[in-house]
């Protein structure tokens, strides 16, 4: 579901007390998405992996080609580099909606 679709993520809430979260939008593509397991893997485009906080909730907008965008809230549990680039793994918090 949503594999190879474009996605945009942005911090919506930060867990760290006193932290000022980076409110920039980060472009990604969906590597895999399993709503039943509440799991999504994204490939981060043109950014350093360290811009992704493991201490924040992100709004994720998935843009399937020819379809309406889908939205969900996610929290990242793992980030790593491999031959594809910067991979970030997240848990889907509240399922998908068509509007924020």
Image: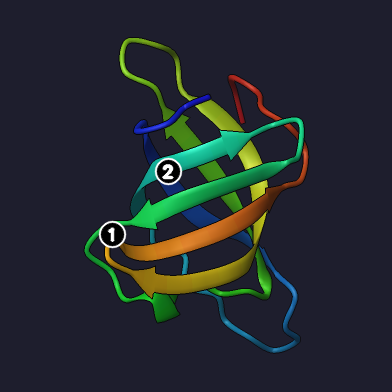
Q: Residue furthest left?
A: 46
Numbered tag placed on residue 31 in the rendering: 2
Which element is circle 1 on?
loop
Residue 52 visible in the picture: no
Residue 62 visible in the picture: yes
Q: Does 69 sit above or below residue 89?
A: above
Numbered tag placed on residue 64 in the rendering: none
Task: Measuring from the top left, give residue 23's x and y in whole percent.
Answer: 47, 65
Task: Measuring from the top left, give residue 6's x and y in whole percent.
Answer: 34, 36
What residue is drawn where x is 75% and y is 75%?
15
| Quadrant in which residue 75 is drawn | bottom right
What residue is drawn where x is 45% and y is 51%?
42
On the image, numbered disc 1 is attached to which residue? 84
Label pair 2/1, CB-CB below 8 angstroms: yes
Task: Measuring from the top left, give residue 84's x and y in whole percent.
Answer: 28, 59
What residue is drawn where x is 28% and y is 69%?
47
Q: Does 94 sit above or below residue 12?
A: above
What residue is drawn where x is 42% and y is 31%?
3
| Quadrant in which residue 81 is drawn | bottom left
- The answer to whether residue 74 is left or right of residue 7 is right
Task: Measuring from the top left, give residue 72's x and y in whole percent.
Answer: 64, 37
- The answer to whether residue 10 is left or right of residue 76 is left
- Distance of label 2 from label 1 (alpha carbons): 10 Å
Q: Residue furthest top?
A: 66
């Amino acid at each position: 579901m949503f594999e190879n679709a474009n996605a945009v993520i942005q911090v919506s809430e930060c867990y760290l007390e006193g932290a000022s979260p980076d409110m920039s939008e980060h472009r990604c593509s969906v590597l895999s998405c399993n709503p039943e397991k509440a799991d999504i893997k994204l490939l981060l485009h043109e950014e350093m992996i360290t811009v992704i906080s493991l201490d924040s909730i992100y709004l994720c907008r998935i843009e399937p080609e020819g379809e309406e965008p889908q939205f969900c809230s996610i929290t990242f549990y793992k980030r790593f580099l491999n031959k594809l680039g910067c991979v970030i793994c997240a848990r889907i918090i509240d399922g998908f909606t068509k509007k924020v």
